[in-house]
Amino acid sequence: MCLAIPGKIIELRTDADGVRMARATFGGIVKEVCLEFTPEAKVDDYILVHVGFALNTVDEEEAKQTFELLRELGQLDELDIPELSS
Amino acid sequence: MKYIDEYRDNALAAKILGQIRSSVTRPWTLMEVCGGQTHAIVKNGIDRLLPDELELVHGPGCPVCVTPLEMIDKAHAIAQRPEVIFCSFGDMLRVPGSEVDLLILKSRGADVRMVYSPMDCLRIARAHPEREVVFFAIGFETTAPANAMLAWQARAQGIPNLSLLVSQVLVPPAMELLLSTPGNRVQGFLGPGHVCTVAGYREYEKIAEKYSVPIVVTGFEPLDILQGILMAVRQLESGRATVENHYPRVVRRDGNPAARERVAEVFEPCDRAWRGVGIIPQSGLRLNADFRAFDAEHRFGVEAIHTQESTVCISGQILRGIKKPHDCPAFGSTCTPEHPLGATMVSAEGACAAYYAYGRYLQSSPGAQASCLGREAAG
Ligand code: SF4
């Protein structure tokens, strides 16, 4: 459970509490991601995401390779957890 | 070479394997620290492609596996309270405590909810001001920043009905314990890439120097693992012991400073028990004095719960690299992923579950036999 999953940022926003957030797509599944630890990340950047937080930005090739690998390892289950609406 | 056809770049994998073979002149034992690496190694049969002189042992690399039984029992005690909404990562729901698991409690009426991110708990707490929302904050360095952010936001926004049951663990102290245990066999490490993404690897430099042990930080892609093994072997064969970063496309020496800062604001180091291993000094994080009001152990008075671990399960020895899953009499018989006895069978990153998933229950490897007899500790 400590593997981070790569996603691509499609939209930036700040939530009601002033927290930097993004919507990111993970092979078509779109999730909310907190960007507080990667303030440099922008739209179209690839980020490594763990439990809803971006830990790092990575390049596209790294992101794609890692995503494929996680799919093979069956380690993408957490993406199926529905998000709560605010 | 049964599995090598399945590598992303077979030619490169074969080349690295050839280099490993020609570099090895005597037996070495390496440990991969990260559970994701264990999973990838077993799935791709990497351990079986290596020359006989090289043995891989599987480290404590999964926070689900090492969360102590006592903490799980505390979670269960809290989750059963009628006023509580107990939130957890999905992986923890099926981890057996002394009696039940969280899913069973849920089926009996407890309000147990699986969350994707700790931040979801903020919304749940706001939506249910009359209830107590408790988050089971487990994890290694990778998860600590997210859990720290939850506590930080709860305090900043003054959310009184939210608390955290913290069982946060740190990798370097566990490596140190292993290295300083008499009879230790581990002579080199593959460092955990995603943990180092957050924490960096300065701590590992101290360990490499103090214990003269090479550490190669790497990812969990098979080629990265093979390359990491080659780099560790080359260090061992030439008598070097430093930290090498084979994952610079993801890991920087100082990790993620913003994340580390938030962790330091919220948590402080503490002694922490690891399932099957026992207490490892300064190997955990707990909420510091500023955030103690959000400590669920304190809020619900469960500090006094103490529990005994199963006597059948040898996951503690597996986590320390002393034994392999098929050395356990329960492995694949009374203990399976459907009915796990110990935590290393529950999570896909646990060594027992990885061995089970890839059919390793049929045979015993010669390396594992050697490990039972205790090969000479070197270095
Ligand atoms: S097979 Fe089950 S009982 Fe045996 S060590 Fe692994 S988790 Fe424990």
Image: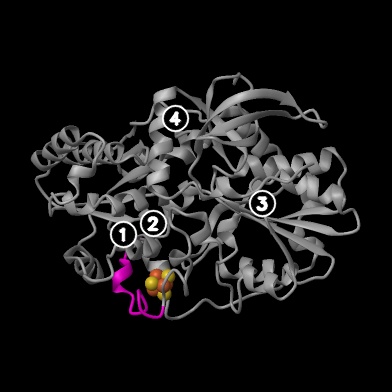
- Residue B60 lies in magenta, yes or no? no
Element at badge 2? helix
Measure the C-alpha gap from mark 4 to mark 1. 37 Å
Disc marking residue B178: 2
Chain under disc 3: B
**Magenta span: chief secondary structure:** loop
Mark nearer the viewer, 4 or 2 = 4
Q: Position of residue B353 (x, y in %)?
A: 39, 63
Disc marking residue B69: none
Measure the C-alpha gap from mark 3 to mark 1. 38 Å
Residue name at image x 41 percent, y 72 percent: B336
Mark 4 vs mark 1: same chain? no
**Image height of B361 relative to B34, above or below:** below
Q: Quadrant of residue B183?
A: bottom left
In the image, the segment drawn in magenta is: B321-334
Q: Quadrant of residue B86?
A: bottom right
Q: Which residue in the protein does label 1 denote?
A: B184
- Asked if disc 1 and disc 2 are in contact, CB closer than 8 Å, the reply is yes
Measure the C-alpha gap from mark 4 to mark 2. 33 Å
Element at badge 4? helix
Q: Which residue in the protein does label 4 denote?
A: A63
Give the residue type that dot 4 points to.
Ala
Element at badge 1? loop
Badge 1 or badge 2: first in the primary sequence: 2
Disc marking residue B115: 3
